[in-house]
Amino acid sequence: VKFFEQTFPESLKHLSSCKSPQQMFGALAKTYYAQKKGLSPENIVTVSIMPCTAKKFEADRPEMRSSGFKDVDYVLTTRELAIMITQAGIDFTSLPNDHYDSIMGKATGAGVIFGATGGVLEATLRTVYEKVTGREVPFNNLEVTPVRGLDGIKEASFTLEKTLPEYGFLEGFELKVAVAHGLANAKKVLQAVRDKKVEYHLIEI
């Protein structure tokens, strides 16, 4: 969001209204989970472990307070966690096996690919396809190919066929999507869109 605010403000209206997985988790923990367990959100402390330091800034944004309190209280980077584990002298090979707490049940198959580059885009397309056609997607993995002249950016397309009656207006519609890895590549693809050199219906960054 900050990247768009500073670099492509005219595209802010096109950003997904969905929060990031980190912020979704925090919001659910302090609303849905708190209600189910009869807990006050102010007594819940949420901590996320993320590879990107930008997640710290995201957690501090003023709009990230679904319950009236911060959705995510603290963010540790994976590097910080590794240092803490080393300082505490924890040896994972000597720890006994245990089960994780499945607080909200198991995830869908689309959730498994969510964390990989292109995973959000593929999960979204799977949902759109199944909603519009009433069938599962006809591919195991979305085939993405590098975009000529735009290193670090890949694209894909597929056509909606045999749509449900209520979505008949989308019959034969070709969806064009792109994946940009990192903000440097995001800037390239968004500049190309701004210059009308390429056109996509969905871009994952």
Image: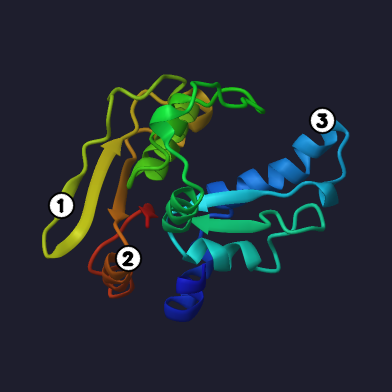
Residue at mark 2 to residue at mark 1: CA–CA distance = 14 Å
Nearest-to-viewer mark from 3 and 2: 3
Residue drawn at x 20%, y 59% is: 152
The image shows residue 26 at horizontal and vertical percentages of 66, 48
Query: Which residue lies under the disc numbered 2?
Result: 186
Query: Which residue lies under the disc numbered 1?
Result: 146
Nearest-to-viewer mark from 3 and 1: 3
Q: Residues within 10 Å of mark 3 (few under 14, many from 20)?
A: few
Residue drawn at x 84%, y 52% is: 42
Marks 3,2: beta carbons within 8 A: no
Extreme residue toward the front, this view? 89
The image shows residue 15 at horizontal and vertical percentages of 51, 60
Extreme residue toward the bottom, this view? 6
Tell me: residue 41, above or below residue 161.
below
Tag 2 or tag 3, which sits nearer the N-term?
Answer: 3
Residue at mark 3 to residue at mark 2: CA–CA distance = 40 Å
Residue at mark 3 to residue at mark 1: CA–CA distance = 46 Å
Q: Secondary structure at mark 3?
A: helix
Q: Secondary structure at mark 1?
A: strand
Residue drawn at x 47%, y 29% is: 132
Tag 1 or tag 2, which sits nearer the N-term?
Answer: 1
Q: Is residue 80 left or right of residue 150?
A: right
Quarter that holds the C terminus = bottom left
Q: Amino acid at mark 2?
A: Ala
State which quadrant residue 61 falls in.
bottom right
Mark number for residue 125?
A: none
Query: Which residue lies under the disc numbered 3?
Result: 36
Q: Nearer the viewer, residue 158 or 119?
A: 119
- Residue 157 can be seen, yes or no: yes
- Residue 18 can be seen, yes or no: no
